[in-house]
Image: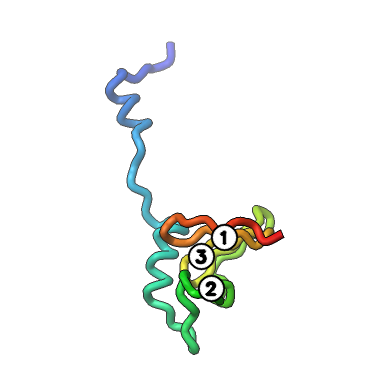
C-alpha cells in the first residue's frame, strides 16, 4: 500500500513558498545595477525597449530586458512593478 501524508504535511508541502532566482527577482537586481555603457533606460522611460536583452525566450514569445521589463512579441510589456502595457498592434 502506498504511503500517505497527513493533512498538515500535505498542506505545508502545497503552501506557497518564497521564490528566489526567478526572472522577476533577477530583473529587479539587474535594473538597479546596469553595467552597460551607456546605461540602459529605466523601466519607466519612454524608450524602455532600448535596454539590452538579458534573457530571450522566442519559443514562448517574451524577452527580459536589463531594466526589468518583460517584453512580449506583440510589443506589450510587463514592468517591474507589475504594471501592464497593452499590446501595440
Vertical comparison of 38 with 16: above or below: below
The quadrant in which the C terminus is found is bottom right
**Mark 2 vs 3: CB contact within 8 A:** yes
Say which element carries label 3. Answer: loop
- Label 1 crowd (10 A; few <14 / some 14-19 / many >=20): many
Q: Residue at x 30, y 18 (%)?
A: 6
Q: Quadrant of residue 35?
A: bottom left
Say which element carries label 1. Answer: strand
Q: Residue at x 36, y 38 (%)?
A: 16
Q: Residue at x 68, y 55 (%)?
A: 59
Vertical comparison of 77 with 50: above or below: above
* Coordinates of residue 57 in the picture (x, y in percent): 62, 59
- Colour scheme of the picture: rainbow
Say which element carries label 2. Answer: helix
**Mark 2 vs 1: CB contact within 8 A:** yes
Question: How far is the residue under mark 2 from the one under mark 1?
Answer: 10 Å
Question: How far is the residue under mark 2 from the one under mark 3?
Answer: 8 Å
For mark 2, what is the residue? 48
For mark 3, what is the residue? 69
Identify the mark nearer the N-term, 2 or 3.
2
Q: Nearer the viewer, residue 69 or 52?
A: 69
Amino acid at each position: 500500500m502506498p504511503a500517505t501524508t497527513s493533512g498538515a504535511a500535505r498542506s505545508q508541502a502545497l503552501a506557497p513558498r518564497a521564490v528566489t532566482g526567478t526572472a522577476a527577482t533577477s530583473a529587479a537586481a539587474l535594473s538597479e545595477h546596469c553595467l552597460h555603457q551607456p546605461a540602459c533606460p529605466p523601466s519607466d522611460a519612454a524608450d524602455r525597449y532600448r535596454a539590452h536583452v538579458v534573457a530571450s525566450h522566442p519559443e514562448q514569445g517574451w524577452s527580459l530586458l536589463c531594466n526589468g521589463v518583460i517584453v512580449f512579441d506583440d510589443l506589450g510589456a510587463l514592468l517591474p512593478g507589475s504594471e501592464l502595457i497593452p499590446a501595440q498592434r
